[in-house]
Amino acid sequence: ELVKTARPRFQNHQQPKIPAWGHVDEKDPKVMEQKIKAAIDNGIDCFIFDWYMYEDGPYLDRCLNEGFLKAKNVDSIKFALMWANHDWVDIQPYTRDTEQKLLYPGKVSPERFDKICDFVIKEYFTKPNYWFIDGKAYFSIYDVQKFVESFGSLEATKAAMDRMRKKAIDAGLKGVHWNLVAWGNPVLPVEKAPSDIPGLIQTLGFDSATSYVWIHHTQLPETQTDYNWVRDRYFSHWDKAKEEYNVPYFPNVTMGWDSSPRCDLKSEWANVGYPFMNTIGNNTPENFKTALQMTKEKLLSNPNGPRILTINCWNEWTEGSYLEPDTIHGMKYLEAIKEVFNTD
């Protein structure tokens, strides 16, 4: 509904974004079959799902469980989980200057975490198309600060991560590849930037790091901040991450950013904080393709570095970052991936 009701909020603002495939139900396996085919046809070989699990149970999991995993062509693409363990607040849509009501705290008890581990290993890690790196199941943490709060100390957090590794081994796997999502510029109203990402990576024993979106590493100074300007500042973060993290870093390419569909239409528009915030402009398919090419070249320039990159995002329509076809650009963002990575 937020996608349908979005409207322009400032001069030269292109809204609403209209999905070329229509406003579909992602818990329908047939819908997911179309998405899987489009992904693999254009060079995407893994979906990393935003995965929500709270103290009292799962949230927004029907797309994965009922749609994706039951699609006839599911085995043609890998999948993995990023535990989106942030607080969930009532901001869709958000009315300016009102209380942001907490619906689900991201913090879980240690006992709950152990049950989550058992569930993830049984229901996902054992699937034939789950994504493994060096034989270990990829599992990413979005909010490492909230993750540490769940256990009360770094030592207890590391012990919890090691317990999950052991549980995976006991289940017949080689272990867990723990991935940390790094960011220094909070976006969501509940986010607090960790003070020492390199230290957390080393102390907790993460196997790799990545980024979720470019704007986690740079501010957007203009109402429509130029895409290439944001890209260049993200690349500076990438250089810093390679020097400081001491684990493989998987770079990100962001398609765009516009969270205005999550803003209440009756509220006056201003850059006052998520979702009322500046956007990325000039994010044409051509500029996206250039960013992909630059990322590819930068990855290949390091003969011993990873050959993995993430893209934000497949379908974040209400945040203006999506690869799925719309009625203006069609399949051009997906085709850019195919052209850069020469996939047949």
Image (spheres, rainbow, N blue to C red):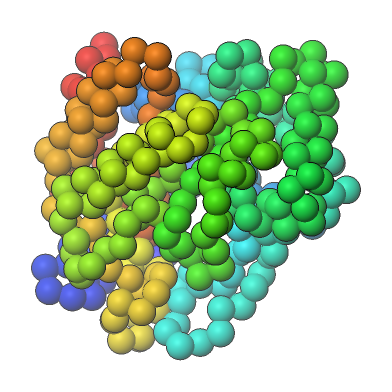
Closer to the camera, 44 or 18? 44
Count of numbered badges drawn on the protein: 0
Closer to the camera, 199 or 50? 199
Closer to the camera, 338 or 148? 148
Measured as percent of width and height from the top left, residue 58 is found at 71, 50
Q: Is residue 117 visible?
A: no
Residue placed furthest toward the right: 111
Measured as percent of width and height from the top left, residue 71 is found at 54, 27
Q: Quadrant of the C terminus?
A: top left
Q: Is residue 53 left or right of residue 88?
A: right
Q: Is residue 257 depicted above or below 308 in this figure?
A: below
Closer to the camera, 136 or 153? 153
Q: Is residue 207 depicted above or below 17 in this figure?
A: above
Q: Is residue 211 visible?
A: yes
**Residue plotted at (79% across, 44% down):** 155
Q: Is residue 113 left or right of residue 217?
A: right
Identify the image quadrant of residue 342.
top left
Q: Quadrant of the N terminus?
A: bottom left
**Residue plotted at (25% across, 49% down):** 233
Measured as percent of width and height from the top left, residue 263 is found at 38, 74
**Residue plotted at (56% across, 84% down):** 99
Measured as percent of width and height from the top left, residue 336 is found at 20, 30
**Residue plotted at (33% across, 37% down):** 239
